[in-house]
Image (spheres, rainbow, N blue to C red):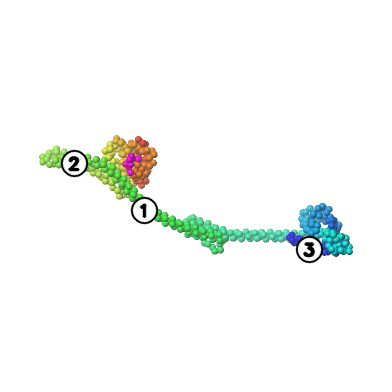
Amino acid sequence: MKSVISENGNNISFLVEGALYDAMLKNDQASLQRTLDLINNMSGIDNVSMYDANNNLAYTSISAKSANHSDPDCISCHVDFSQMFSAEEKSYRIIEAKSECIMNPDNDSVRNLMIKSPILNAPSCHTAACHAHSADQKILGSLIIKMPLEKLDSALQESTTDFFLMATLMTILFILFLILFTNKKIKNPLNEIIRAAEKVAKGDKNTRLRIKPNSLSDMRMVSYAFNEMLDNLHTANTELQNWSQQLEYKVQKKSEELGQAQNELINIERIASLGKLSLSVAHEINNPLSGILIYTKLIYKQLSNPALDQTKVNNMLKHLKLIESETKRCGDIVKGLLDFSKKDQEGFEAKHLHKILSDTATLMSHPMKIANIHFLTDLSAKHDQIFCSPNQIKQACMAILVNASEAVGENGEITLRTHNPNSDHIQIEIIDNGIGIAEADLPYVFEPFFSTKEKASGTGLGLSIVHGIIQSHKGKTEAKSQPGKGTTIAITLPLLKT
């Protein structure tokens, strides 16, 4: 727009200068004024004023009768008029619509272009017959042309409006394009990735992204990486499943081996307990066997006497009855040992715990009697039916009783009793008044190979095997003790609900 204004101003100024040239050369003031009046009526020119070398007004196209124009003598308002325009070069100045300049007071809504064109002392001027200037005078005066910029401003406003409308339309189209582009090229592929990730999270291992050839390179790279990640996860998951199956198989095998080892340990412990009982039982059996032998010889001698009377027959019958009783007692002792030494051939079954404990007490009464230990039983529980392996329960109680017999001295006391702590359980308590267990050792008494016996006389497996047996019966074991006051081992088992 500035270029258009500048070019238009140059054209107008050249036109005005050409029209006034002849009148100025001849110094024809009347012709000069008529030309100015004629120029004033031209379209696109508001007024033309001529000034001398000192910027004083010489001629103007503004009529003196006009009330719409102020005095065109600029230096009357602008003391610094010579500094507003260049003296030797053509210069331009745009007067804004709301400017303080009152050159056009009747229309303050239009901008104006002020063109100051210097009148130079050309050779044709100072060589003319009517010249009034010397040859060394450079500037003779100046022309100031005032042009309204209403049409240019209207065109500018229209162009600006069109530009903003076009810019708005282009912006909307560009935003729509961006929305469509981002939806198609970015948002939709990202949604596919999210949906695929959700499927994978729900367990769909075969989900893969479909890679489109016209998609963005970055999205293709992300899709390739996502599919590769899923492939790697599938491979890793397959390997983990294989390892899990192998581990499960190995654990099963090891569990079977541990079960066999535990059964062997239980059998070994049973044999060890049986060995401890053998010495005392041997003494117990030896006494009735000696009596049987003596009475058998006595009866043999009496039968050898041919003169038998009824009194001797009665004595022999009495001796035979005694032999029968002692023989039966030996058989019961041996039978108890044989039952205890057998391996478990049968599974769990419903049994009354008091019957198992009575058999155990009978088996242990002989070594207790020999060791001079007072052995008491108090089977006072009202409900005693449990689901168990009878021989294993017997072995667990035997192991605790053996330990208790080793912990008490001569004339010591061991009590085996039962009670119901609640309606769902029965508790066995084996109480002794022996040397007790140190408080620091109590948490470890059921651990394998832990023993409090002096000089490592124990293997440390007895109570650990007891703990394992009771755990297999879904029960629990507890130990309470005070050094020098005795120990209580409590076994809690669930009752069989009928």
Precedes in sequence: disc 3 or disc 2: 3
The residue indicated by pointer 2 is 293
Precedes in sequence: disc 2 or disc 1: 1
Q: CA distance from mark 2 to mark 1?
A: 55 Å
Disc 2: CA contacts within 10 A as few (<14), some (14-19) or many (>=20): few
Q: Amino acid at mark 3?
A: Asn
The residue indicated by pointer 3 is 11
Q: CA distance from mark 3 to mark 2?
A: 163 Å
Magenta region: which residues?
Answer: 452-459
Label 2 or label 1, whichever lies nearer to me, is 1
The residue indicated by pointer 1 is 253
Task: Give the side of residue 327 with respect to residue 376, left or right.
Answer: left
Q: Does the magenta-highlighted stretch encompass residue 166?
A: no
Residue 182 drawn at (x, y percent): 58, 59
Residue 375 drawn at (x, y percent): 30, 38
Under tag 2, what secondary structure? helix
Q: Which residue is at the far front?
A: 136
